Image: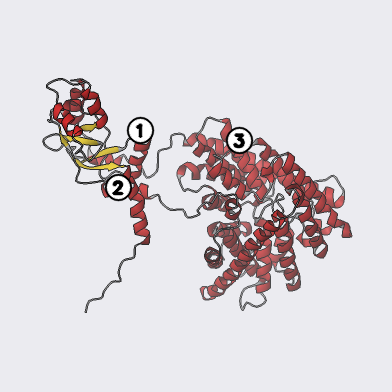
C-alpha cells in the first residue's frame, strides 16, 4: 500500500500558483557559474594582450633578421630592403622553417587561424594543445617576418584561443564553458592587435560562438574590455588608422551599394581561386612539408615586382586611406598582393586574412575613386575594405564595426552598411561556403552559418502534445489490468492512470504488469494503488525544457496536466518531440495563398 500512499500524496499535493510559476521563469538560462567564468575570462584577456605584444615583436624581430640582418625588434618594413633579387630567397627560407615546424611540431599551426579555431570549438570540444599556444606565434612571426603577405590577426586569434582553451582545461569546467574561454582569448587577442573591442565581440558572435547567450557573450566582452584597457600599456593606443573622410549623403548610397557588389565579386574571385590553387598543391608528388617553401618562391618574385606586397603591409593601408597612392600603384598592389597571398595561403603556411583583405579592398576602392562622382579616395578605400571583409568572411556587422573602430570615423556608417551588406549578399548568392568554412568542409566537417532561435525554445508543450489520450481508470482491479495487457488489444506500451474526475494518478507499463503477474500485488489492490508515480509537464511549458528532462531522465512518455486541478490534458512521447522540427519546417517552407481583396 506504500505505492498507494505515494500516489495519493502526488494526487493531492497542491500545485504551484500559475502566476507565480510564470514569474519564476527567466529570459535566459540560469548561470550560477557565470561570475567565475567571467573572472577567468578577464585573466585570459590580459594573457592574450601579452601574447599579442609578443607576436608583434616577433614579427618585427624576424623582419629585421631576414631582410636587414640585424637583431632588433624596431618597427620596419620589408619593402625598404636592399637585397635585390636575393629577396626571393628570404620567403623560401621562412617557408622551409614553417614546413619543418608543422611536420615535427604541430600540424595545427598551418592555415590562417580562424577555421582552426572554429574546428576546435565545434569538433574538438574546444581543446587546444600547449604546442599550438607556443608554436603558432613563433611560426607566424617567421612566416610574416620573412615576407609572408599575411596579417597578425589570424595567428593571434589562434594563439589567444589556445590560451583560453588551456585555461579552461586547467579548471574543472564544462565543454560549453571551455568554448567560452577559447573564444574570449581569441577575440581579446584581436582587440589587442587592432584596438577594436566592439568588432571583436561581434566577430565572436558571427563567427565563433555559434550562439548569443549571456553565458558566452559576457565573458567574451569582458575579455575584450580587459584587452582594450591593457593594450595602451604594451602597444599603441587609439585608432590604428585614424581617418576623417567625406561623408556622403543618402542620395549617393546607391553608388556605395554598387561598390559593395564589385567587392563581393572580388571576394568570390579570391575565395574560389584560393582553393583551386590549394587543390593544385595537393596534386604535387611531394610531402606537404615542402609546400610553404614552394609557395614562397612566388612570394619572393612578387616582392621583386612590388616590394609593398611583402609582410603585413600596414603602411599600404595607411596610404590607401590617406588617398596618397596613385592608380597605377593601386592596380599593381591589388593584383600582385592577391597573387602572392593566394599562393602563400594555399601552400599551408601560417598567417591571417584580415590585413590582406583590407589591402585588397582598399586598393579596389582607390581605383574606383577615380570614376566615382563623389567622395575622396580615402572614403572609397575604406568602403572597399569593409565590403570585401563582409563578403569574404560572411560577417557584415563585424566588418562595419571593424572599419569604424580602425579609423575612429562613425560618420560613414550608412555608406559602410550599404557596401558591406551588398558584398555579403553577393557572396551568399554566389558561393556555397565562405573562405573560412570551405577549409573545414574540405575536411568532411560541414557546418551551417545560419543562427536562429531553436524551435524547441519557443514552442509550447500544448502545441505538440498528443490528445485525446488513451487512459486506464485508477479503480481498475489488477487482475483486469493483467488481462487487458494479455489480450494483445492494448495499443501502447504504457498508459496514464487517471482518477474518476480525470486527474492524473500515475503511469502503468507492460513491465509493471509482468512484475505483478509474478505475484507482486494483493487481492484488493487496484491500478491506482500500484501504478508508477511519474514526472509531468504543463501545456504552457517550453518544449525544450521538457525535452531536456526526458533526455536526462530517459523518459519516453510524459503526461501533460493542467496547472489548475492537475487533470490530464495530453501526452508527449519522443514522436511528439519530432513534431517540433516538423512544425518549424512547415512555418519556414509552406506558402500561404495571396490575400484576396474584397469587391
Say which residue appears at 52% left-offset and 76% top-offset: 251
* The N terminus lies in quadrant: top left
Place of residue 8 in the rendered image (x, y in percent of width and height, measured from the top left): 17, 27
Eyeballing the image, is 190 above or below 554? below
Eyeballing the image, is 4 above or below 66? above
Side (left or right) of 135 relative to 523: right
Place of residue 53 in the rendered image (x, y in percent of width and height, measured from the top left): 70, 44
Q: Does residue 467 appear in this view?
A: yes
Place of residue 79 in the rendered image (x, y in percent of width and height, measured from the top left): 81, 59
Labels 1 and 3: the sequence-earlier one: 3
Closer mark to the observer between disc 1 and disc 3 = 1
Q: Which mark is residue 367?
A: none
From the image, tell me which residue sits under label 1: 553
Q: Residue furthest front?
A: 487
Side (left or right) of 451 relative to 114: left
The alpha-carbon separation of the residues under discs 3 and 2 comes to: 40 Å
Assign a secondary structure to mark 3.
helix
Place of residue 160 in the rendered image (x, y in percent of width and height, measured from the top left): 63, 42
Q: Which mark is residue 460?
A: 2
Amino acid at each position: 500500500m506504500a505505492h498507494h500512499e505515494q500516489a495519493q500524496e502526488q494526487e493531492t499535493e497542491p500545485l504551484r500558483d500559475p502566476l507565480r510559476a510564470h514569474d519564476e521563469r527567466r529570459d535566459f538560462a540560469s548561470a550560477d557559474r557565470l561570475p567565475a567564468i567571467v573572472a577567468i575570462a578577464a585573466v585570459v584577456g590580459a594573457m592574450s594582450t601579452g601574447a599579442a605584444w609578443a607576436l608583434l615583436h616577433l614579427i618585427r624581430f624576424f623582419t629585421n633578421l631576414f631582410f636587414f640582418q640585424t637583431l632588433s625588434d624596431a618597427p620596419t618594413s620589408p619593402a625598404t630592403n636592399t637585397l635585390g633579387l636575393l629577396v626571393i630567397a628570404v620567403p623560401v627560407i621562412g617557408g622551409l622553417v614553417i614546413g619543418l615546424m608543422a611536420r615535427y611540431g604541430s600540424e595545427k599551426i598551418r592555415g590562417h587561424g580562424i577555421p582552426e579555431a572554429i574546428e576546435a570549438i565545434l569538433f574538438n570540444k574546444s581543446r587546444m594543445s600547449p604546442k599550438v599556444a607556443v608554436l603558432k606565434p613563433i611560426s607566424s612571426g617567421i612566416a610574416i617576418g620573412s615576407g609572408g603577405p599575411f596579417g597578425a590577426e589570424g595567428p593571434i586569434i589562434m594563439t589567444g584561443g589556445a590560451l583560453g582553451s588551456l585555461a579552461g582545461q586547467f579548471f574543472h569546467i564544462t565543454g560549453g564553458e571551455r568554448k567560452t574561454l577559447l573564444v574570449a582569448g581569441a577575440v581579446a587577442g584581436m582587440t589587442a592587435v587592432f584596438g577594436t573591442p566592439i568588432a571583436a565581440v561581434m566577430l565572436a558572435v558571427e563567427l565563433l560562438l555559434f550562439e548569443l547567450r549571456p553565458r558566452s557573450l559576457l565573458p567574451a566582452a569582458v575579455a575584450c574590455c580587459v584587452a582594450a584597457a591593457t593594450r595602451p600599456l604594451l602597444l599603441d593606443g587609439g585608432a590604428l588608422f585614424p581617418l576623417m573622410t567625406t561623408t556622403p549623403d543618402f542620395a549617393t548610397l546607391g553608388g556605395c551599394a554598387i561598390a559593395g557588389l564589385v567587392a563581393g565579386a572580388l571576394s568570390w574571385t579570391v575565395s574560389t581561386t584560393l582553393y583551386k590553387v590549394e587543390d593544385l598543391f595537393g596534386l604535387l608528388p611531394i610531402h606537404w612539408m615542402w609546400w610553404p617553401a614552394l609557395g614562397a618562391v612566388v612570394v619572393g618574385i612578387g616582392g621583386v615586382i612590388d616590394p609593398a606586397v611583402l609582410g603585413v603591409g600596414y603602411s599600404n593601408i595607411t596610404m590607401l586611406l590617406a588617398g596618397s597612392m596613385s592608380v597605377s600603384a593601386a592596380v599593381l598592389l591589388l593584383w600582385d598582393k592577391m597573387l602572392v597571398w593566394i599562393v602563400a595561403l594555399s601552400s599551408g603556411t601560417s598567417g591571417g586574412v584580415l590585413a590582406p583583405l583590407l589591402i585588397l579592398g582598399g586598393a579596389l576602392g582607390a581605383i574606383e575613386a577615380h570614376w566615382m562622382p563623389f567622395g575622396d579616395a580615402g572614403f572609397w578605400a575604406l568602403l572597399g575594405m569593409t565590403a570585401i571583409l563582409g563578403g569574404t568572411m560572411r560577417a557584415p556587422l563585424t566588418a562595419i564595426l571593424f572599419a569604424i573602430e580602425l579609423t575612429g570615423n562613425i560618420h560613414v556608417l550608412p555608406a559602410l552598411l550599404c557596401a558591406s551588406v551588398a558584398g555579403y549578399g553577393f557572396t551568399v548568392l554566389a558561393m556555397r561556403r565562405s573562405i573560412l568554412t570551405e577549409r573545414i568542409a574540405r575536411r568532411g566537417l560541414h557546418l551551417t552559418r545560419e543562427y536562429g532561435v531553436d524551435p524547441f525554445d519557443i514552442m509550447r508543450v500544448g502545441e505538440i502534445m498528443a490528445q485525446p489520450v488513451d487512459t486506464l481508470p485508477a479503480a481498475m482491479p489488477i487482475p483486469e489490468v493483467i488481462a487487458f495487457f494479455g489480450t494483445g488489444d492494448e495499443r501502447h506500451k504504457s498508459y496514464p492512470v487517471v482518477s474518476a474526475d480525470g486527474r492524473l494518478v500515475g503511469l502503468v507499463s507492460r513491465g509493471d504488469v509482468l512484475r505483478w503477474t509474478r505475484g507482486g500485488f494483493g487481492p484488493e489492490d487496484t491500478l491506482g494503488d500500484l501504478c508508477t508515480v511519474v514526472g509531468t509537464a504543463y501545456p504552457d511549458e517550453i518544449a525544450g525544457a521538457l525535452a531536456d528532462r526526458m533526455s536526462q531522465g530517459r523518459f519516453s512518455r510524459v503526461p501533460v496536466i493542467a496547472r489548475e486541478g492537475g487533470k490530464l490534458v495530453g501526452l508527449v512521447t519522443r514522436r511528439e518531440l519530432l513534431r517540433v522540427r516538423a512544425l518549424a519546417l512547415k512555418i519556414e517552407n509552406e506558402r500561404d495563398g495571396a490575400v484576396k481583396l474584397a469587391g
